[in-house]
Image (spheres, coloured by chain):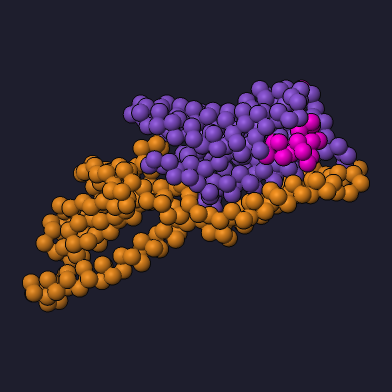
Chain colours: A orange, B purple
């Protein structure tokens, strides 16, 4: 180490290199932060629970809450971490995953997402008119077509949204290097502060 | 699973953990030993990265903690090292909640201090070829004490966590064995290549100043 008088000890350098190599060569394979993803598929809310980095959370408890934090259903994830819930109203649904040992994650399926796919579902916020009087009201056929299109698009982009959510949670190599940099930076600043020259009096 | 997220623990546990963490950190910073800062940074970096290599156990997953080894080699300096690494894990990886940082620090740091206090005297008088067992005990103690503290934080927050807490402790057992072998091997390796690192480790002592970490001094 740099503080040893009379240069570096070979063994100390070996040890330091070993630890640094071990730290850098370890690829972030799995991580243990619970994540949950859910989206509307028709009238169903379909989702999966997983650990950031990849592994599926099998047997985790899924609690579905409405906008007023009232529990609607309690589910258990399958072996691949997936779960399904049939929505009764087109309102906000909060999906809370819990692996039972203190890990917890949540995901919000918005009322807009559900309502766009399911015009037939009762909408809790339908009291305010969404179409101004000047416009032509869509016919039932158009409504059905629009819902079908929305559903098709939602199904197409679902893997993308899932991928995006997983990528945001995954720790990247840059995060690892950045964190290590911060640690040594902090140490350097601390040592400099404690060894700075006293001001001349 | 040593990183408790936000939204799981109750307010009294969060506040209590924060207060204890602040107290322990203050004591540790008061007697900061400059000679131990570079190795502390190395161990903090190793701890920071080790959380990414996980072993799935049941519905959860676990990873090496290294807190027993850090306590044994760094003494009080292990506390700021663990705190900084946990802070950065929260910021970069999202492991552990921001509000739960105090509790998470206590859960990791107190076992490190206990390892230092209990095992350092043994390490000083043990025969060189048995150093492995001191390391193995440190690894075992660090993991199981952390497991116990995590379980305790869960039970104190919500009585409904009682069965889950038992599960947490059980899931820590295989990890404790892996950690024991790893810590023992590292310590035996250090004994062979850099025995001065072990000789200078001191039990946590509030009064006496610590000797230089390296033989040469400044």
Task: Say above or below: A132 vs A47.
Answer: below
Picture quadrant of residue B73: top right
In the rendered image, the residue lying farthest to the left is: A140
Q: Can you see residue B101?
A: yes
Kindly identify the residue that appears in the image at 46 percent across and 47 percent down.
A32
- The quarter in which the C terminus of chain A is drawn is top right
Q: Position of residue B97 (x, y in %)?
A: 48, 43
Q: Can you see residue A110?
A: no
Kindly identify the residue that appears in the image at 76 percent across and 33 percent down.
B198
Q: Position of residue A189 (x, y in %)?
A: 74, 49
Which range of residues does the magenta coloring cover?
Answer: B186-207
Kindly identify the residue that appears in the image at 65 percent across and 40 percent down.
B81
Q: Nearer the viewer, residue B6 or A136?
A: B6
Q: How many marks?
A: 0
Q: Is residue B193 magenta?
A: yes
Q: Position of residue B54 (x, y in %)?
A: 50, 46
Q: Nearer the viewer, residue A175 or B56?
A: B56
Picture quadrant of residue B163: top left
Q: Is residue B151 left or right of residue A172?
A: left
In the rendered image, the residue lying farthest to the front is: B129
Q: Position of residue B32 (x, y in %)?
A: 74, 35
Q: Is residue A107 left or right of residue A147?
A: right
Q: Is residue B94 left or right of residue B212?
A: left
Q: Is residue A89 magenta?
A: no
Kindly identify the residue that appears in the image at 20 percent across and 73 percent down.
A149
């Amino acid at each position: 180490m740099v503080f040893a008088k009379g240069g570096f000890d070979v063994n100390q350098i070996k040890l330091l290199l070993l630890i640094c190599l071990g730290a850098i060569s370890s690829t972030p394979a799995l991580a243990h932060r619970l994540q949950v993803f859910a989206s509307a598929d028709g009238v169903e809310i379909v989702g999966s629970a997983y650990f950031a980095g990849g592994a599926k959370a099998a047997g985790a408890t899924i609690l579905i809450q409405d906008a007023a934090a009232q529990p609607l259903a309690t589910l258990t994830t399958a072996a691949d971490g997936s779960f399904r819930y049939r929505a009764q109203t087109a309102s906000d649904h909060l999906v809370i995953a819990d692996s039972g040992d203190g890990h917890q994650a949540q995901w919000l399926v918005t009322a807009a997402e559900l309502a766009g796919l399911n015009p037939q579902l009762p909408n809790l916020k339908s009291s305010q008119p969404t179409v101004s009087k000047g416009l032509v009201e869509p016919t039932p056929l158009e409504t059905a077509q629009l819902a079908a299109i929305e559903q098709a698009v939602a199904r197409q982009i679902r893997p993308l949204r899932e991928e995006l959510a997983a990528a945001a949670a995954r720790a990247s190599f840059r995060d690892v290097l950045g964190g290590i940099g911060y640690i040594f930076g902090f140490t350097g600043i601390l040592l400099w502060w404690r060894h700075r020259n006293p001001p001349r009096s | 699973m040593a990183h408790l997220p936000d939204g799981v623990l109750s307010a009294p546990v969060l506040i209590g953990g924060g207060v204890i963490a602040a107290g322990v950190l203050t004591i540790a910073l008061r007697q900061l030993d400059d000679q131990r800062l570079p190795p502390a940074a190395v161990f903090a970096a190793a701890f920071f990265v080790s959380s990414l290599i996980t072993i799935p156990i049941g519905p959860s997953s676990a990873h090496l903690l290294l807190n027993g080894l850090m306590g044994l080699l760094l003494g009080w300096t292990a506390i700021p090292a663990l705190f900084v690494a946990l802070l950065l894990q929260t910021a970069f990886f999202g492991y552990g909640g921001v509000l739960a940082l105090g509790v998470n620090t206590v859960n990791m740091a107190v076992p490190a201090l206990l390892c230092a206090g209990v095992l350092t005297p043994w390490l000083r008088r043990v025969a060189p070829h048995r150093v492995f067992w001191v390391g193995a005990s440190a690894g075992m103690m660090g993991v199981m004490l952390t497991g116990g503290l995590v379980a305790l934080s869960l039970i104190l927050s919500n009585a409904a966590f009682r069965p889950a807490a038992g599960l947490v402790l059980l899931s820590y057992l295989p990890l404790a064995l892996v950690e024991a072998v790893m810590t023992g091997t590292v310590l035996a390796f250090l004994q062979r290549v850099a025995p001065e690192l072990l000789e200078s480790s001191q039990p946590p002592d509030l009064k006496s100043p610590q000797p230089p970490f390296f033989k040469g001094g400044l």
